[in-house]
C-alpha cells in the first residue's frame, strides 16, 4: 500500500513541475515583440541612455516580459496579454528620460500595445508611418519632443485610439481629415507645433471632449460643425479669420472656449450668452467689432469668466453681462467702448451678502472711452478686495488715488473729443 500511495504523490509533483515549466514558457515574450523592443533600443542614441535609466536596464540576454520585476527591464514595459505564442507587450513608457534619436525606421509591429508614452524626450525625425500597425493603441503620448515633418495619414488608422498627445513638437502641415476615423478619440492635443491649413470638420468624433490646437499656424475659417461631445475647445494663437459661428451653441456640453489671438471679426454672437454649459469664454486679441445681446439678457448663462479684451468693439458696455448670475471675471479692456458705466455693473461690484448671484471679483474696463460719474458702489470698495481697472478712459472724476482708477492716466480731453465730440 505504501508504494501505491507514494505513486500519486510523485505524479502530483511531476504535474506541478510541468505546470511551472509551462507557465514559464507562456510568459516568454512573443518573438515579434522582442524584435521591436530591440529595434527601439538600437534606435535610441546610446549617448543619451543613462546606465541607470529605464532603457539602460534593457538586457536581451533575458526575456523582456519575464523580467519586468527584475533588475532588467526595470521599467517601461507591461505585458498584460498572454497569447498561445507568448506574452505580448501592452504598455511601453519611456518618458522624460532625456533619450534622443529617431524612431522613424522602426517597424512598430506591436499588435497588443495599448499605451505608448515617449513624451518629454529629445526624439527627432518624422512620426513613424508604421504606428498604423498598433490596432489596439488607446493612448499615444509624444508630447514635448522634436518630432518634425507632417502628421502621418496613417494615424487615422488607429481605430482604438482614445487619447492623442503630440503637443509641443516641430510638426508642420495640415491637421488631417483622416482623424475623423478615430471614433473613440476623447482628447486631441496638438498645441505648440507649426501646423497650418484649415481645421478639418471632425463632427464624426462623438466621444471627443478636448481639442487643443493652440499656438500653431492654423488658418481659414472655423468649420461649421464641431462634435457635440466637446467640453473644451482651445484654438488660441493661430491665424483663424471670419466670424465666430453662432452654431457653437449646438456644442451643448462646451465649457471652455478659447479663440484668443486670432483674426476673428464681426460680432460676438448672442448664442454664446445663452449657451447651456459655457463657463469660460476667451476671445481677446481678435478684430471683433460688436457684442450681440441675448434675448433673455443673459440670466440663464453659466459663464463665470468672459474676456473680450483687445478687440475693436464699439458701442455701450454690454449691460446684460451685469445680470449673468455666475459671472465673476469680465475683461473688456482696450476696445472702443464709450458711454457710462452701466448700473448693472455697479450693482454687481457690491452685492449684499447672501445673494445667489456672483459678484464681480475682476472687472477690467481700462483702455476705452468711458465717461461720466463713477457709480457710488465703487467708492465703497475696500482696496485689494476686488480687481477693478478703469484707467485710460475719459473718466475725469476718477483720481489715481482710488485703487480702481489706478492703472493708467485718463485719456486727454482732446483724444476723447476726437473719438466722440459729445464726450463731456
Ligand atoms: C470604439 O467605439 C465603438 C463605438 O463607439 C465601440 O463599439 C468600441 O468598443 C470602441 N473601441 C474601443 C477599443 O474602445
Ligand atoms: C504664439 O505662438 C508662437 C509660436 O508658437 C509663439 O512664439 C508666441 O509666443 C505665441 N504668442 C502668444 C501670445 O501666445
Image (cartoon, rainbow, N blue to C red):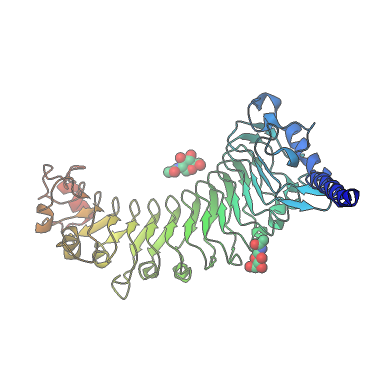
The image position of residue 246, as x and y in percent, is 44, 69
- Most extreme residue toward the front is 1
- Most extreme residue toward the bottom is 295
Q: Residue at x 69, y 37 (%)?
A: 125
Specify whether residue 168 is in view: yes
Q: Residue at x 72, y 44 (%)?
A: 128
Nearer to us in this view, 142 or 402? 142
The image position of residue 332, as x and y in percent, is 29, 55
Left or right: 253 with respect to 348?
A: right
The image position of residue 409, as x and y in percent, is 18, 42
The image position of residue 265, as x and y in percent, is 42, 59
Specify whether residue 364 is in view: no
Position of the C terminus by quadrant: bottom left
Nearer to us in this view, 109 or 214? 109
Image region (quadrant) for ligand 1: bottom right
126 to 197, vertically: above or below: above
How many numbered dots are placed on residues in this image? Answer: 0
Left or right: 236 with respect to 389?
A: right
Amino acid at each position: 500500500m505504501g508504494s501505491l500511495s507514494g505513486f500519486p504523490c510523485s505524479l502530483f509533483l511531476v504535474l506541478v513541475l510541468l505546470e511551472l515549466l509551462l507557465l514559464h514558457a507562456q510568459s516568454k515574450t512573443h518573438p515579434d515583440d522582442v524584435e521591436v523592443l530591440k529595434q527601439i533600443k538600437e534606435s535610441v542614441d546610446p549617448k543619451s541612455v543613462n546606465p541607470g535609466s529605464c532603457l539602460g536596464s534593457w538586457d536581451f540576454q533575458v526575456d523582456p516580459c519575464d523580467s519586468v520585476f527584475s533588475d532588467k527591464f526595470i521599467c517601461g514595459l507591461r505585458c498584460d496579454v498572454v497569447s498561445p505564442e507568448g506574452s505580448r507587450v501592452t504598455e511601453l513608457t519611456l518618458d522624460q528620460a532625456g533619450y534622443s534619436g529617431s524612431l522613424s525606421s522602426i517597424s512598430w509591429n506591436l499588435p497588443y500595445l495599448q499605451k505608448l508614452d515617449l513624451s518629454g524626450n529629445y526624439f527627432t525625425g518624422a512620426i513613424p508611418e508604421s504606428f498604423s500597425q498598433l490596432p489596439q493603441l488607446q493612448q499615444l503620448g509624444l508630447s514635448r519632443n522634436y518630432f518634425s515633418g507632417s502628421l502621418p495619414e496613417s494615424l487615422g488608422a488607429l481605430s482604438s485610439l482614445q487619447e492623442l498627445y503630440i503637443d509641443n513638437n516641430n510638426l508642420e502641415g495640415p491637421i488631417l481629415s483622416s482623424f475623423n476615423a478615430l471614433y473613440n478619440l476623447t482628447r486631441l492635443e496638438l498645441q505648440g507645433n507649426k501646423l497650418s491649413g484649415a481645421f478639418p470638420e471632425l463632427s464624426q468624433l462623438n466621444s471627443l471632449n478636448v481639442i487643443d490646437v493652440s499656438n500653431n499656424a492654423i488658418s481659414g475659417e472655423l468649420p461649421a460643425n464641431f462634435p457635440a461631445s466637446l467640453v473644451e475647445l482651445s484654438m488660441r494663437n493661430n491665424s483663424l479669420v471670419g466670424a465666430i459661428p453662432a452654431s457653437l451653441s449646438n456644442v451643448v456640453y462646451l465649457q471652455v472656449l478659447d479663440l484668443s489671438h486670432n483674426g476673428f471679426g464681426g460680432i460676438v454672437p448672442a448664442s454664446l450668452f445663452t449657451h447651456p454649459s459655457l463657463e469660460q469664454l476667451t476671445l481677446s486679441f481678435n478684430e471683433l467689432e460688436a457684442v450681440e445681446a441675448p434675448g433673455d439678457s443673459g440670466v440663464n448663462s453659466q459663464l463665470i469668466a468672459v474676456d473680450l479684451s483687445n478687440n475693436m468693439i464699439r458701442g455701450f458696455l454690454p449691460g446684460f453681462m451685469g445680470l449673468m448670475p455666475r459671472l465673476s471675471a469680465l475683461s473688456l479692456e482696450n476696445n472702443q467702448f464709450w458711454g457710462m458705466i452701466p448700473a448693472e455693473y455697479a450693482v454687481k461690484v457690491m452685492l449684499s451678502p447672501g445673494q445667489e448671484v456672483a459678484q464681480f471679483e475682476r472687472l477690467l474696463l481700462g483702455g476705452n472711452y468711458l465717461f461720466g460719474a463713477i457709480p457710488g458702489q465703487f467708492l465703497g470698495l475696500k482696496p485689494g478686495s476686488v480687481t477693478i481697472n478703469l484707467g485710460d478712459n475719459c473718466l475725469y472724476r476718477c483720481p489715481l488715488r482710488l485703487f480702481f482708477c489706478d492703472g493708467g492716466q485718463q485719456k486727454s480731453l482732446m483724444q476723447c473729443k476726437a473719438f466722440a465730440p459729445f464726450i463731456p
